[in-house]
Image (cartoon, grey):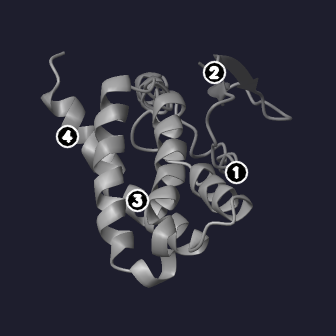
Amino acid sequence: MASSSFSLVSIHPPLTPAKIPTSTILILRNAGLILNPPPPPPSFSTLSSKPISVKPFLSALRASHSQKYVYHDPIPKFAEAETQKFKAELFNKLSKDKDKFGDDLDSVIDVCVKIFNDFLHNEYGGPGTLLVEPFTDMFVALKEKKLPGAPVAARASLLWAQNHLDHDWEVWNSNSPK
């Protein structure tokens, strides 16, 4: 939380005639706020002797505190269920292109599923935590093992995750007892 402070500054005109009151201005400082530059000082004819209310300033300060979103730890049961769903749907997607994968389809799926499962168990904590690294890792691992269709498999995996993972997480957590 940013600390707030305020100062009272008395402004005296260079030559203060006895009948012109001295004005007091409240200056608020808050490191967490971005404030517009102050308007030019009013002329002495527009200065009022009315007290300045601090309430609007304080309510603006309270409303300006940024909220932090806390990401959850991975949920092992969700990771297991989602990995099985991912495996089935990736198999359905890639088996349509049997010519590209040939006899290596099961090996390609196993590599993708292992990396996806590790990501879900170790890093995925709900919406906002889907990373690209597991999918680039899939691509690299498939290439290193000289398995066919690395770009197609990695892209299909990424697209599936983008279209399903966050939604499935929200459904899972809305159905779980609190």
Q: Is residue 37 left or right of residue 1?
A: right
- Label of residue 162 in the image: 3
Q: Position of residue 166 (x, y in %)?
A: 34, 47
Q: Residue furthest right?
A: 14
Q: Around disc 1, counting alpha carbons within 10 Å, would you say few (fewer than 14), some (14 to 19), or many (20 or more)?
A: few
Q: Which residue is mark 4?
A: 171
Nearest the viewer among 77 and 100 is: 100
Residue 40: which numbered mark, if any? 1
Q: Which is closer to the viewer, label 4 or label 2?
A: 4
Mark earlier in primary sequence (3, 4): 3
Q: Which residue is mark 2?
A: 2
Q: Are marks 1 and 2 in contact (CB under 8 Å)?
A: no
Q: Give SS at disc 2.
A: loop
* Cα distance between the residues tagged 3 and 4: 15 Å
Residue 78 vertical placement versus 155 (above, below): above
* Secondary element at tag 3: helix
Q: Nearer the viewer, mark 1 or mark 3?
A: 3
Tell me the mark number nearer the camera, choosing from 1 and 2. 2
Displayed quadrant of residue 47: top right
The amino acid type found where label 1 is placed reads Pro
Between 76 and 130, the residue placed more toward the observer is: 76
**Looking at the image, which residue is at 51% across and 57% down?**
107
